[in-house]
Amino acid sequence: MKKILTNPATHLLLAIALGLCAGMAWPEQARQLRPVGESFITVLRWLMLPVMCCAVAHGVASLRHLVNPGMASAKALLCFTMVSALALLTGMAVAIVLRPGEGLVLAAGAPVAPNPLVVGAGAFMLWLLAASLAAGTALALAGHAGQRLADGIGSIATAGFALARHIVRIAPLIAFAGVASTVGRHGIEGLARAMDLLLGIYLGTALFMALVLGALARLTGFSLWRFMRAIADALLLAVGTASSLAAMPRLVDKLVEAGCAPEAVRVLVPAGYAFNLGGSAVYLGVALPFLAQVAHIPLGAADYAAMFAIGLLCSRTASPMNGSAFMTVTSAVAMLPAMPAEGMVLLFSVERLMKCRPVGNLVSVGVSCMAIAAWTGKLDRSRLERGLGR
């Protein structure tokens, strides 16, 4: 009972329930809470700017660790990128089909102009990302000479994501204000949109794991279901801590037991955590179209292509730490200024209920590492067949 009462998810559900009651009982007063959530999101956007740039630079600089004579680093990067891209596309497909953001009118009684999704307005962010990529590339090429500076930049990014973990602790307060103001302005339909969003993310994660990771596991020669059973304790740890990072040591042990060469695992798993967080990519793929739908922004093929490119780039800054995925969405939205803060508040309101995200991250890293080990000749097939054979 004590664990239930102290669980952050319980606090969030209680805050949502209280916000719902406040919005229905005192709609006029509840509407006044709208600036609380929107101001928080605005501050967060600018707070994440330096963190995102440091994460990009450090992530690119860390590529030097993949340059190992015993491994095909290009194959590893190609596999990580393809899996992340498919995760992002799966999330976007779910958002396009379910359309969880439709139904809200952002300003009562005021028509919503069909503004196009203008990426150019976020050109400043794009230039910063380009500079971060260039800096990371320079540090990677510098080898050991640039390692100290790269480690310092990585420490800044780590500190930023640690701050994000603490920021997420006020999720119940923001959830209360966001739900109360949304229900006060739009009725119960506003809260229903947040629940539809949550459903879309869980569905997208399930489809990504079943279709993409399931197919990759079969091509590699093992059963995804047996793999998930083998790492069940790591999955439970990831769900309990809301972070796949805590389960990394256990995942490393399981991959070695399944036949991956230890020297390959020591490189591939950290690289996978940096470049292949599939659960976070699915979340990003659902969240970006959701925000456009909330803002009534009509999206064409070019808009979705731009959204995909920005999402794939920003997913490189994702961290397995609790709360960082929301910061990744914030980074992407900074380049898409037409996205409304109100939608971000709804997104933040259900942040701590997305327990599927760390599971998707952990399984994505594990399956991708198994596939790359097989592709580069670092997988013991006899041990694989004994442990995870189909």
Image (cartoon, rainbow, N blue to C red):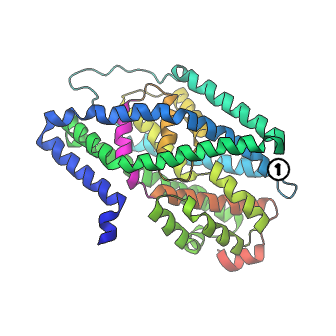
Q: Nearer the viewer, residue 211 or 195?
A: 195
Describe residue 360's horizontal placement relative to residue 4 as left or right: right
Vertically, is 200 above or below 300? Answer: below
Query: What residue would you read off at disc 1?
Result: 67
**Element at label 1:** loop
Question: Which residue is depicted at the point 74% across and 68% down?
Answer: 260
Q: Which residues are magenta?
A: 340-355
Location of the N terminus by quadrant is bottom left
What x and y, as percent, mark residue 248?
61, 63
- Of 138 and 190, nearer the camera is 138
Quarter of the image for the C terminus: give it.
bottom right
| 165 is within the stretch colored magenta | no
Q: Is residue 335 in sight in this rendering? A: yes
Q: In this rendering, does residue 285 appear at all?
A: no
Q: Amino acid at mark 1?
A: Val
Question: 55 or 356, which lies in front?
Answer: 55
- Mark 1, other Cα within 10 Å: few <14 / some 14–19 / many ≥20: some
Tell me which corner region of the image, top left, top right, bottom left or bottom right, holds residue 338. top left
Residue 350 is inside the magenta segment: yes
